[in-house]
Image (cartoon, helix red, strand yellow):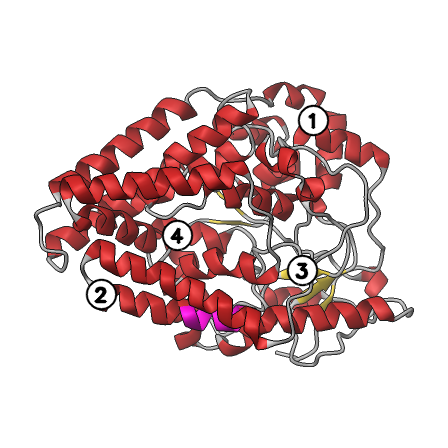
Amino acid sequence: MGAQSRVIGSASHKVSGEWASLDRVISGGPLEKGGTLRVRDPSPHGERGGARLLKVERCFRVCCFLSHRPLFFGVLVMAASTIATTTTLAGEQSATLRANMKSSSNPAPEKHEDQDDQFFWSYTEEPHRSRRMAIIKAHPEVLKLCGPEPLTIPLVLAVVALQCTCAYLLSNTPFWSWRFWLTAYVIGATANQNLFLAIHEISHNLAFKSGLANRLLAIVANLPIGIPYSASFRPYHLTHHKSLGVDGLDTDLPTALEAFFLDSIAGKAFFCTFQILFYALRPMMVYQIPLTKIHALNIAVQLLFDYVLIQAWGGKAVGYFILSSFLAGSLHPVAGHFIAEHYVFDRASLENKQSRDPKNRIPVPETFSYYGPLNLLTYNVGLHNEHHDFPAIPWTRLWKVNEIAKEFYQDLPYHRSWVGVIWQFILDKEVGLWCRVKRKEGGRKVGAWKEEEIQN
């Protein structure tokens, strides 16, 4: 495998007024209101990074207290500190690279300056906008599928009730017993992954028509997860849609430092085991969003809920929630979607097909769908191409999108198994954290982070 980066196209990315108007209908979230996009560069000094690490460690020490099992959560503290250190340093490195790119007046080179950078670098717009417009032109009736899905509401409440019931039944079960861990893995992790994806669905305003009602339902869905995150997830996730693959904006992208240090079977196994912590900590290290009233409410409600549970059922109840969340983002079948959605697996084949002329290069697929049975447990998140094409269409109607616009999806590569995805990701030397498509420009932070736009 060559060390040089892979160039995918040569056209520059410009967002026209036509796209922006359509986004207002499609995105499920508000658009920015003018102004120049600026990404805050992480501090080159160690004080802020150290403060962030201290906050992370304090959070997990609270988890230790709640669970009365400091050894287990001490391991999580060490892993979180390692991940935070890696992502903090990578954020500084990314900021330096962006500054260098902005200061250069030369067009984008075919080879990336950093010879250790093996990401696929694209100089074209992300593919979902153009495919969305083509589908709407060919099948205008697809827009009738947009809008909330009320079925999401009772499903969220049912899964929250299920998790609370399990927490109560396990309140007198030893934490390290096989019953506790088996329940947390089979039921708890599956249920909490379901709630992760319910919050994902709700973040697109697809449960209620009211933005505030959606924010409140997300806070309810957050309760069995144990740690408040629903309010922060929405702005980061909507930016992932608006800025797919944009370095410094799309926090779903692994940093170069992560890819470098975890470029081995052991490193990838570590990443898959602790990937929930990578996804939780990386966004804060790339850029930070302002706290709003919704964030404050999310934190207050979660802490109060955890406190009441500890008083009523003991610390093991909250320990069950947090363990379930950890396992949901670890080596678990439903966690395969994290990797399956945007990692490029057929790297060698794609590289062999690439032309040396950037203008003739074949676009590398950036999003991959999965059409298997685990979609039943995960709000059809496997239909990820369909979701990125139409984020305002709820989970119950994504199959209809595929049916209506079948000619647009039938030739796209897709995954047959999420378990197989995890297995191949770890063991295949040609697959790793480098296998993501990145672009240097385009996209934006949703709403420029104005409080009323984040909350509504």
In space, the residues marked 1 and 4 are separated at their CA atoms by: 30 Å
Up/down of 324 relative to 223, above or below: below
Q: Earlier in the sequence, mark 2 or mark 3?
A: 2
Which residues fall within the magenta stretch?
81-87
Gap between marks 2 and 1 measured at Cα: 48 Å
Residue to which mark 2 is pinned: 70
Whether label 3 touches label 4, CB < 8 Å: no
Query: Where is residue 9 drawn, in percent x and y?
Result: 79, 59
Q: Could you say which is closer to the camera, residue 232 or residue 139?
A: 232
Indicate the amino acid at tag 4: Ala
Instruction: Relative to 126, say whether 258 is above or below.
Output: below
- Compare marks 3 and 4 and give the one earlier in the sequence: 3
Judge depth for marks 1 and 3 and give the one in front.
3
- Is the Cβ of the residue at disc 2 closer than 8 Å to that at disc 1? no
Element class at badge 3:
loop
Q: Which residue is mark 3?
A: 248
Q: Is residue 46 magenta?
A: no
